[in-house]
Amino acid sequence: MESLKELYRIGTGPSSSHTMGPERAAHRFKEKYPQADRFLVTLYGSLAKTGKGHLTDDILVKTFAPLPVEIRFDLSDKPLPHPNTLELTAIENDKEIGFERVMSVGGGKILSEGETEDAPADVYPLSTFADIKAYCASRHMRLWQYAEECEGTEIWDYLKEVWRCMREAVTRGLETEGTLKGGLDVQRKAKMLYRQNHIDESAETRENRLVCAYAYAVSEENAAGGIIVTAPTCGSCGVLPSVLLYMQERRGFTDTEILHALAAGGIIGNLIKTNASISGAECGCQAEIGSACSMAAAALAELHGMELDQIEYAAEVAMEHHLGLTCDPVRGLVQIPCIERNAVAAMRAINALSLANFLTYTRKISFDVVVNTMYETGRDLFSKYRETGEGGLAKYYTGKK
């Protein structure tokens, strides 16, 4: 498996596949053809169908600036190597001097046809939870120690930056009010949730309110095109930071313990990315929110010092009950239902932690089995439920209450 640096990416929202991926492709292509005086980008598949709502054209214009770029949205049904495909053309004196076809495969990662150097070298020799668990158990290691063994101690400096960016996204989101751009008139709710406390508020209600406020804060920052961390994607970036920050504030966990939890959650995300998918365009929202919930549950279990079996169960149950979740962004915007789903998944991650604490040794389903199931389920989903904005809420929401 790849480094956690390839999973936790710091970048511009609102979509790892629709903004971070194309932004990275455009940067690389622009550097490759410095003599070009203009560019042409053609978007296909999900990028063409929901690129406007995901601000794909905006990020491409900003990235190619000050040079002009023409952006075409090709809605044809031509065969594609990936649902998120774009073609970049460099032009000088009205002559084509360069061409590249790129796939934005999720989590901000891009792959080019005929190009291998974009794929980072594997740093984790094991690629199933069963194998990792057996290895760690035989050496009395925790998941974060396995991550350190494979990545080197320098991974902690990177995760420190990840945690800093996550906390800053929460802070900015809690301080910002107003309406998100895009035409849906979605009001930012994080600040309201955070401040809406009552003297007689129960502990359970306070937990739900604060966790949701933090999840809304990061997700709203993402929807507004702010800087966030993919965990594992932009559309699901609010789940992991919300539960970790809440638990740190509630129980006083140190930043070092939080970094260990990020590493454990990252291994879970890496396993899903390697053996299934974290792309909504490929496997629906179960691949994004389901994966984020699974990562968060595992991170919480690590944070609380649970055994490997309990960490596995927390991650498994979190994913299992997102199976079949469709990706149906209204008007292609990462707002409805995406923002609210981050809050719901954050609460569900805490529920999964509780179940793992009580029921781990009665379970029947392994984490590896549920990951394989998610992938097959996602590939079976009809295309209109995979980030195209053509089915589900995207089809039936009219804007009227």
Image (tube, rainbow, N blue to C red):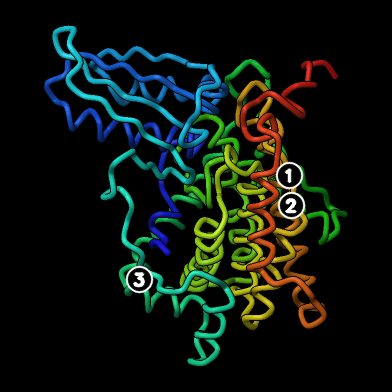
Q: CA distance from mark 2 to mark 3?
A: 30 Å
Residue 181 image point, x, y percent? 57, 20
Residue 366 at x, y percent in the picture = 70, 72
The residue drawn where x is 66% and y is 56% is 293
Looking at this view, is 304 or 46 the one in front? 46
Residue 29 at least partly seen: yes
Residue marked by disc 1:
325
Picture coordinates of residue 13 (x, y %)?
48, 35
What residue is rendered at 56% in x and 81% in y? Answer: 133
**Relative side of 95 to 287, left or right:** left
Q: Nearer the viewer, residue 311 or 85?
A: 85
Neighbour tally class for label 2: few under 14, some 14-19, many 20 plus, Cα within 10 Å: many
Give the distance between the C-alpha atoms of the residues marked 3 and 1, in whole angstroms. Answer: 33 Å
- Identity, as a three-letter code, of the amino acid under mark 1: Leu
Looking at the rendered image, the quarter that the C terminus falls into is: top right
The answer to whether residue 195 shows anywhere in this view is: no
Q: Are circles 3 and 1 on residues that touch, CB within 8 Å?
A: no
Establish if 79 lies above or below 259.
above
Alpha-carbon neighbours of circle 1 within 10 Å: few (<14), some, or many (≥20)?
A: many
Dot 2 and dot 1 residues touching (CB under 8 Å): yes
Q: Secondary structure at mark 2?
A: loop
Q: Secondary structure at mark 1?
A: loop
At a point 73% along the width and 44% down the height, the residue shown is 325
Q: Amino acid at mark 2?
A: His
Return the residue at label 2.
322
The residue that label 3 is drawn on is 151
Query: As shown in the figure, which amino acid type bears the numbered disc 3?
Result: Glu
Q: Say above or below: 317 vs 386.
A: below
